[in-house]
């Protein structure tokens, strides 16, 4: 697996009245990705923003734009996010009857494809998808809101997916999302996650740069 750990601050916890500046500053804090939480009020009980936000923020940063689509039938929005400048598009296994096809669609735009699993979804759900993805996103909270408590069972799931990927010789990224902070980050890294999303922990920190270093572990 890749040795590098990537930190992906979720702008869900940023100041929405000055999102451009918030995203611009992330590079100076040492962030690697900009995590965009897209919610449709249907797949999850909250609504955030869509591809126009991704497009508006794109000129503000050259970091990796990591679009996490928490929407029903995500295939409908893949083209829009690809054209809006997303570098990774992640869709939920639970939200799409033909998720394999959607992953192929994402890659057809030259964008990295991610598959996300809710806390209640078994890791075997990615068994037949691992060859078709660049990243698996393990949710460590029920999606919909920032600032929730980390669900420990995510750790065993990360371990299982990392083990399977290694056995099959696949160098995929494993992203963990929800409740990642200075305490839980190490557990996630030790379990085999190499992309760590953090919303509240980063944006509510007095020293965001230091928090990102702590989450990365170096
Ligand atoms: C939850 C989102 C997460 C969330 C992370 O639905 O997918 O990205 O905003 O926020 P924290 O780090 O505050 O749990
Ligand atoms: Zn997310």
Image (spheres, helix red, strand yellow):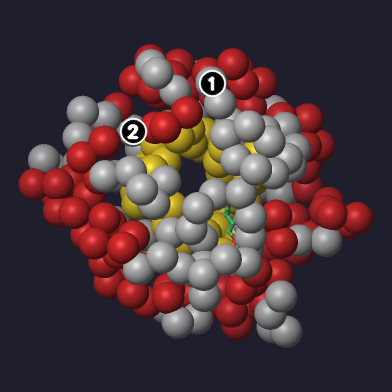
Between residue 113 and residue 161, name the one nearer to us.
161
Q: Residue at x 53, y 21 (%)?
A: 73
Residue positioned 33% across, 43% down in the render? 121
Closest to the camera, between mark 2 and mark 1, is 1
Please give the residue where the numbered disc 2 appears in the rendered image: 133
Q: Is residue 112 left or right of residue 125?
A: right
Residue 32 vs residue 214, the one in the foreground: 214
Percent x, y of residue 33: 57, 53
Image coordinates of residue 44 in percent, x first then y, are 60, 40
**182, 45: nearer the viewer:** 45
Is residue 147 placed above or below 91 in the rendered structure? below
Residue 48 visible to an observer of this rendering: yes
Q: Residue at 69% of width from left, 44% of height from top? A: 46
Q: Quadrant of residue 67?
A: top right
Residue at the extreme left of the image, as rendered: 167
Instruction: Classify mark 2: residues with Cα within 10 Å, few (<14), some (14-19) or many (20+).
Output: many
Which image quarter is the N terminus in? Answer: bottom left
Q: Secondary structure at mark 2?
A: loop
4 left or right of 142? left
Gap between marks 2 and 1 measured at Cα: 18 Å
- Image mark for residue 73: 1
């Amino acid at each position: 697996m890749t040795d590098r750990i990537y930190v992906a601050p979720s702008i869900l916890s940023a100041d929405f009245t000055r999102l451009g500046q918030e995203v611009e500053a992330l590079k100076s804090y040492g962030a690697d990705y900009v995590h965009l939480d897209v919610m449709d009020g249907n797949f999850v009980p909250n609504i955030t923003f869509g591809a126009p936000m991704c497009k508006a923020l794109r000129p503000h940063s050259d970091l990796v734009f990591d679009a996490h689509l928490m929407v029903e039938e995500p295939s409908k929005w893949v083209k829009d996010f690809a054209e809006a400048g997303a570098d990774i598009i992640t869709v939920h296994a639970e939200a799409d009857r033909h998720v394999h096809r959607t992953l192929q669609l994402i890659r057809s735009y030259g964008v990295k494809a991610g598959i996300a699993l809710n806390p209640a979804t078994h890791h075997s759900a990615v068994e037949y998808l691992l060859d078709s993805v660049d990243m698996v996103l393990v949710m460590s909270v029920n999606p919909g809101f920032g600032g929730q408590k980390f669900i420990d069972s995510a750790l065993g799931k990360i371990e299982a997916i990392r083990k399977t990927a290694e056995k099959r010789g696949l160098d995929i990224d494993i992203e963990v999302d929800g409740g990642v902070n200075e305490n839980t980050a190490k557990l996630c890294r030790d379990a085999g996650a190499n992309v760590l999303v953090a919303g509240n922990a980063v944006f509510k920190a007095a020293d965001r740069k230091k928090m990102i270093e702590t989450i990365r572990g170096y």
